[in-house]
Amino acid sequence: IPTQGLDGDPLPYVPEWTGSINARYTHPLPGGEWEAFIGGDWSYTGEAANRLRSTDRYYRKLEAYDILNLRVGVEGNGWQTVLSVDNVLDADEIITYPFDFQTAAPINGNIPDRLGRPRPRSISIGVRKSFDF
């Protein structure tokens, strides 16, 4: 940890609160060989900062954000088909302020931010086959 940190300073990129919930519900389909499922997960990351000291030139505050992922599908006989929607709420908060001191070029005396954001909402369909040997 850099020497500018003081006793009691929160660590960079470490929020005070985080949490997550994951759930999945399955139900057998007629015939008994297949089952349908629905599930999802939600995660919360509280606010944090990218530097130890708020007086640091490169200090930035990171807002809290939520990510919600949902999935629905069927499985049976070694097959699984899943429809997934990741980042359902399309969270777009800044989650990192990475900074490369060696390649950053000042613009009008200011060094530009490079921002890290969550992946945007995405929808996918997956098919999987398991083989028993």
Image: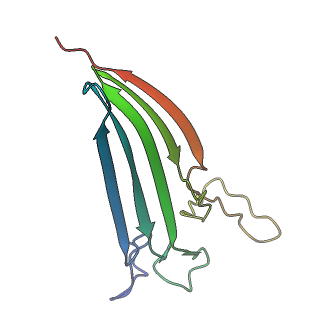
Residue 7 location (% of width, % of height): 33, 88
Q: How many marks?
A: 0
Instruction: Work out whether residue 105 or residue 96 is closer to the camera in this orientation and state it.
Output: 96
Closest to the observer, 78 or 5? 78
Question: Could you tell me which quadrant the N terminus lies in?
Answer: bottom left
Nearest the camera: 19 or 31? 31
Residue located farthest toward the top when viewing the structure as drawn: 133
Residue at the extreme left: 133
Name the residue rendered at 60%, 49% in the picture: 121
Residue 21 rendering spot, x and y as whole percentages: 34, 61
Q: Is 121 above or below relative to 108?
A: above
Q: Which residue is found at the position 47% from the left and 51% from the top? A: 69
**Could you tell me residue 92's position as x and y percent?**
62, 61
Instruction: Tell me the residue at 51%/73% (across/down).
Output: 64
Q: Position of residue 16 (x, y in %)?
A: 37, 78
Display colour scheme: rainbow
Q: Quadrant of residue 118?
A: bottom right
Q: Is residue 105 left or right of residue 41?
A: right
Residue located farthest toward the front when viewing the structure as drawn: 30
Residue 129 drawn above or below residue 14 = above
